[in-house]
Amino acid sequence: MRMARIKTGIPELDEMLGGGFMPGDAVMVAGSAGTGKTTLALQYLVNGITQFGDRGIYVTFEQLPDQIYRDAKNFGWDLRRMEEENKLRLVCTSPNLLLEAEGEYLLDEPIKEIQPRRIVIDSMSHLAMFVKERELRKEAYRLIMYLKTKGLSSLLTWEASEMVGRSLSVTGVGLSFLVDCIVLLRFVEIESSMRKALLVSKMRGSDHDKRLREFEITSQGIKVGAPFSEYEGVITGAPRRSITEEAARAWAKAFTGKT
Amino acid sequence: MSQGREILSRLLSSEVKGDLLVLFHKNPGLVDTMDGVARRIGRRANSIEADAKDLVDLGVLKTKRIGESEVILLDRARDKEIQEITSNYIKSLKTGGGV
């Protein structure tokens, strides 16, 4: 029997994921600033609430909730109302408090209050600033295992400034192996315009679409489009048009006079 | 003096309290240490401590221990009650009673 998936509610992305994320998995959404990590994370929670009846918690270190309420409203998402209806909790705190291991855990209360199924930590890279590099993997592992123990499907964002050009490193500090699924968001320059691309680069225990797809941030949130089928080298940051059979024939004709 | 009047006068007795109330009402999910809260309104912990403690006494804010740190957060249920009491008091002023 196939396991029910945790759908993002973005149809094309769910299709890429073979139906959605695996329940209880820790998913990392990595990308440089402005690629849409926070939008994707919010959409995952909002769609969970409005389409699938999954309550959610959003943990932020960087932005105050006030700013998040406002930005979400631009997409038509009324987070304040969702909070009043006990379907959502926005927790704004300092990273070191989330890592406190003694006694009551910071998330125990909101988890008890709304019994969520989904959680977003925005962002793990901010949390990494408060932990020594050699401690980071241990602390991240502890956090991920806490979320799994509570039965939560987590989405962790990671700001990866180096993911431009040819570098394929996701976190640079070895967190990739701790998570079950990685979704990469990146800018690509194609024909002198900056476009956005999405790739599912890892998904434990499930097949997934390995193609790079274009996406846009619209007034309704993220919309995933078609694969970059006419280009190759997009992921390395040096895209060039793929030579199609037709183009190859035209080249051959031009040079040899034969087809 | 009515309960509403007493609460209102305590809530509005300093600029820091006003800043804290605005911060926590705009961001009801904020959970942070005294130092962290102070930083979010551009002040230092020692300059907000007394006012924050008064808001804890009133019940708008509450404290709890997370590991080795004491954190401050909005007491959502008590805050709703206080808002109701103060709003009823203000209404009664408009209708000419309750002072």
Image: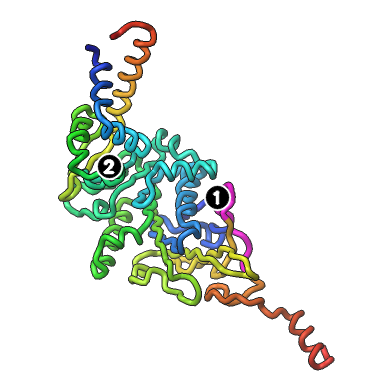
Residue A236, horizontal then vertical, whole percent: 52, 76
Left or right of A21? Residue B19 is left
Label 1 is found on which chain of the structure? Answer: A
The part of the image, by quadrant, that contains residue A157 is bottom left
Find out whether residue A35 is within the magenta segment: no
Front-most of residues B53 and A102: B53
Residue type marked 2: Glu
Instruction: Look at the image and give the residue range highlighted in magenta.
Output: A217-228
Please give the name of the residue rendered at 29% of the width and 59% of the height, measured from the top-left corner: A145
Q: Earlier in the sequence, mark 1 or mark 2?
A: 2
**Residue lying farthest to the left in this orientation:** B68
Front-most of residues A70 and A201: A70
Q: Quadrant of the C terminus of chain A?
A: bottom right
Please give the name of the residue rendered at 26% of the width and 60% of the height, measured from the top-left corner: A130
Front-most of residues B26 and A58: B26
The part of the image, by quadrant, that contains residue A27 is bottom left
Q: Check disc 1 and report the residue beneath it.
A: A221
Q: Check disc 2 and report the residue beneath it.
A: A109
Q: Secondary structure at mark 2?
A: helix
Left or right of A52? Residue A65 is left
Left or right of A35? Residue A258 is right
Few, some or many C-alpha atoms within 10 Å of disc 2 (few <14, some 14-19, many ≥20)?
A: few
Front-most of residues A257 and B26: B26
Main SS class of the magenta portion in the image:
strand
